[in-house]
Image (cartoon, helix red, strand yellow):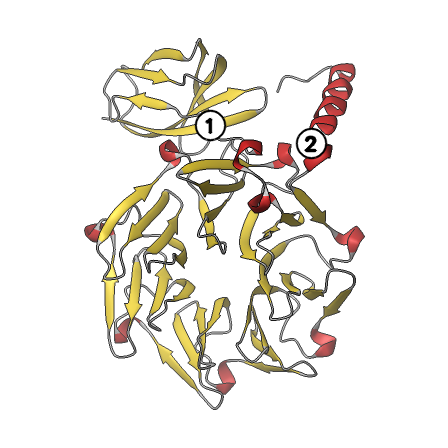
Amino acid sequence: MKKTPLFLLIIFTHLFLGLVSAQQPFVNYTQADGLPDENVLDVAVDQNNHLWFATQEGVARFDRSSWVVYTTHDGLASNFVNCIAIAPNGDVWAGSDAGVSRFDGTTWTSYNTSDGLLNNLVNHIAVEGDGTVWIAVTGGVSSWNDTMFTNYTVALGLPSPMVGFVGIDDHNNKWFATWLGGVAKFDGQSFTVFNQDSGLIDNNITTVAFDSAGNIYLGTYFGITVLDMQGNWLRNIEHADGLYHEAVMDIVFDSGGRMWAGIFVDYLLDGGITGVADSIYYSYGMLDGLVSLLVNRLAVDHDDNIWIATGGGVSMFTGAQLSVSTLQPKPVVKVYPNPTQSLVHIEAPEIQAADLLLTDLAGRVIMKGHMLHGRSMIDLSGMAPGLYHLIIKTPDQAVSHRIIIQ
């Protein structure tokens, strides 16, 4: 990797800080501020606008001025907490690798397979309006009605036992995001499965979200698929449309109806967040002040701040309150023809000069080139058929495009 001379780095740092200090969109929190651990796997906002974080060293509560940390000494099933959710009555539910734990404001009570939970490895928790708790586990889904668990598996209609996320729409339909099986809608009686045959961009679903019109947004490692409330395919959202890149970890909507996507680090690319305002996509990463490129989950607080749980701490993003004129969209890149057997044309009018890297799926660089004046062409004749990543790198950002060689 080419190293930047120290004196240039110092000059750049001072210039950059001078540019962003007037309106820095991120406020960051780490162990130095009170987090028990900086690998934060989930975040939730309670009715008092306080924040709850799932970490590898317990659950952390932040009331905007002080921190409280809960561990197994307080009754948690495990300190390795994967997910967290807030019930309508204010109870806090935490999922771990040893079951689930409920906090009623005073006491933590834990449940595991001996109590009827399908599996102790909990991936996600969602609570519907009547207080029923839905728990995605390795093996299927468990629901808790305050007296007993009911379990749902492949034998009952799930398309895959690997359930990673539960979304609940305004009609109390449950949408179970699975690995390899697409998404399953459960109406309380039966399952309806949506997968690539239904138009999904991928069968590995990371998250589910709903806009104000009832449309369903399904996050994957290859972008976002949008369905209408009946499950009909509407469109896909990919990097070419404006996403930071396509490894989507979470999706939330703010009170203005704007979509925010959490993007995980992928190969040579940074993770970050992408927001959509007036059909324009705006992306932010570590250069903008995000605490870490390892984005895990998002939450929106009562003031429309976006909270980002990452592998390096927590960031609060105030950009939802910034005017559109202050936001910086990612450049639009066109790559064609794609799929291809030989020549590929690259057009990026907003990028005057960039390095081009072609990598395989393992991230190995197999071809290098350059782009000038927003245009370039590369010859892929003789390359083995398959899926590749084209990386367009400028001094301050990287843009990725998938290329299929036939």
Q: Amino acid under label 1? A: Val
Q: Amino acid under label 2? A: Val
Give the vertical position of 157 relative to 289 (above or below).
below
Side of 226 relative to 106 (left or right): left
Circle 2 Cα neighbour tier, 10 Å, few/some/many (<14 / 14–19 / ≥20): few
Q: CA distance from mark 1 to mark 2?
A: 22 Å
The one nearer the camera, 116 or 222, is 222
Observer able to see residue 291: no
Residue 194 is situated, as x and y percent measured from the top left of the image, at 25, 58
Side of 66 relative to 391 (left or right): right
Observer able to see residue 387: yes
Rendered residue at 48%/12% (across/down)? 352
Side of 302 relative to 213 (left or right): right
Rendered residue at 40%/58% (across/down)? 209
Which quarter of the image is occupied by the N terminus? top right
The circle drawn on residue 20 is: 2
Residue 235 is situated, as x and y percent measured from the top left of the image, at 27, 45
1 or 2: mark nearer the eye:
2
- Whichever of callouts 1 and 2 sits on the residue coming sooner in the sequence is 2
Q: Label 2: state its secondary structure.
A: helix
Which image quarter: residue 45?
A: bottom right
The one nearer the camera, 212 or 114, is 212
The residue that label 1 is drawn on is: 399
Residue 389 is situated, as x and y percent measured from the top left of the image, at 39, 28
Residue 192 is situated, as x and y percent measured from the top left of the image, at 23, 67
Which image quarter: residue 302?
A: bottom right
Give the vertical position of 241 relative to 69 (above or below).
above
Circle 1 Cα neighbour tier, 10 Å, few/some/many (<14 / 14–19 / ≥20): many
Outermost residue, top direction?
372
